[in-house]
Each structure stands twice: as structure tokens, then as C-alpha cells.
Image: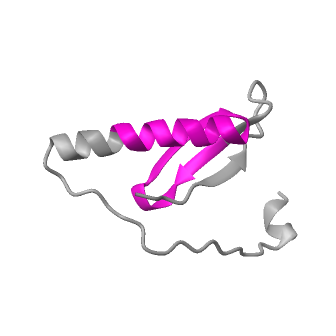
Amino acid sequence: MRYSVLLEPIQESGFEGCYYAHIPVLDLTTHGQGVEGALAAARELVETWIAEKRANGEPVPTETTALIGHIEVPGSILSP
């Protein structure tokens, strides 16, 4: 199975060089060091999650199409 992973740099102190890895169709998020570390963490999380779902006789969602969109938010909204 193939799943889309959205990678996002973590902007928090102590997480320099780390990325969030979001798997939208499964509503899962993890993180890892660098892009490869985040992808490896995502793969491990998804494999474990799928195994648990199957062990409980639950369906495992598959992804058919993934789209990423962007929106603009006025800067004045972000300022206090």
C-alpha cells in the first residue's frame, strides 16, 4: 500500500532538523530527524497501525488520490 506523507519542519526549540510527518488519510502524525528520519518514523507507525487494525478485524483505509492545497490568510489577522 502507498500513503501520502506531508512533511513539515518542526519550529520548536530542541527539535532542530526534525520534521513532522503527517499521514492524512489515516489521521496519524509522527516526527523524526531530517526528512529520511521522519519518513522512516511514518513507515514504522503506519505498519504498526495497520497490524493492529487487522488484528482487531477492522478495515484499513486505502488512499486513492491526495491533493494538497494552500490558502492565504491576511497578515492583519495574525497580528494582535
Residue plotted at (52% across, 42% down): 42
| Vertical arrangement, residue 10 with respect to residue 6, above or below | above
Work out which quarter of the rendered image holds the C terminus and state it: bottom right
Outermost residue toward the left in this view:
57
For residue 79, which quarter of the picture? Answer: bottom right
Residue plotted at (42% across, 67% down): 63
| Vertical arrangement, residue 8 with respect to residue 30, above or below | below
- Residue numbers of the magenta segment: 20-48
| Vertical arrangement, residue 68 with respect to residue 28, above or below | below
Q: Position of residue 16 (x, y in %)?
A: 80, 30
Residue plotted at (13% across, 49% down): 57
70 lies left or right of 75: left
**Frontmost residue, 49 versus 78:** 49
Work out which quarter of the rendered image holds the N terminus and state it: bottom left
**Frontmost residue, 80 versus 62:** 62
For residue 72, which quarter of the picture? Answer: bottom right
Tell me if residue 47 is in the magenta stretch: yes
80 lies left or right of 54: right
